[in-house]
């Protein structure tokens, strides 16, 4: 099994992406409407709801700025 964010993005029918933001990040995204860099990106199995993968490296996090 390939453990890259791209793999999980290609398998959208099986996995759901959930960005995790800090408290300030959520405030900026939700109330101010500004984009914020998530602290990590998590992918969950749609069928079971279990965490399949988590990525917190800076390069990956920058790819998901402002994406829900």
Image (tube, rainbow, N blue to C red):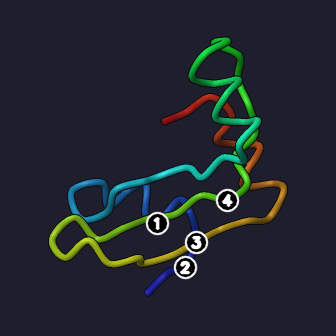
- Which residue position is annotated with label 3? 54
Nearer the camera: disc 1 or disc 3: 3
Q: Helix or strand or loop: what does disc 3 sit on?
A: strand
Q: Position of residue 24 (x, y in %)?
A: 76, 36
- Label annotation for residue 40: 4
- Residue with the mark numbered 2: 3
13 or 54, which lies in front? Answer: 54
Neighbor class of circle 1 (other Cα within 10 Å; few <14, some 14-19, many 20+) is few
Residue 4 against residue 16 in the figure, above or below: below
- Of labels 2 and 4, earlier in sequence is 2
User: Which residue is located at x 69 percent, y 34 percent?
Assistant: 65
Task: Classify mark 2: helix, strand or loop.
Answer: loop
Residue under pointer 1: 7
Q: Are marks 4 and 3 in contact (CB under 8 Å)?
A: yes
Quick check: marks 1 and 2 in contact, CB under 8 Å? yes
Find residue 57 and report its image quarter. Answer: bottom right
């Amino acid at each position: 099994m390939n453990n890259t964010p791209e793999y999980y993005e290609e398998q959208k029918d099986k996995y759901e992406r959930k960005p995790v933001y800090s408290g300030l990040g959520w405030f900026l995204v939700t109330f101010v409407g500004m984009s914020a860099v998530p602290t990590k990106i998590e992918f969950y199995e749609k069928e079971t709801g279990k965490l399949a993968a988590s990525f917190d490296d800076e390069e990956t996090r920058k790819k998901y700025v402002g994406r829900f």
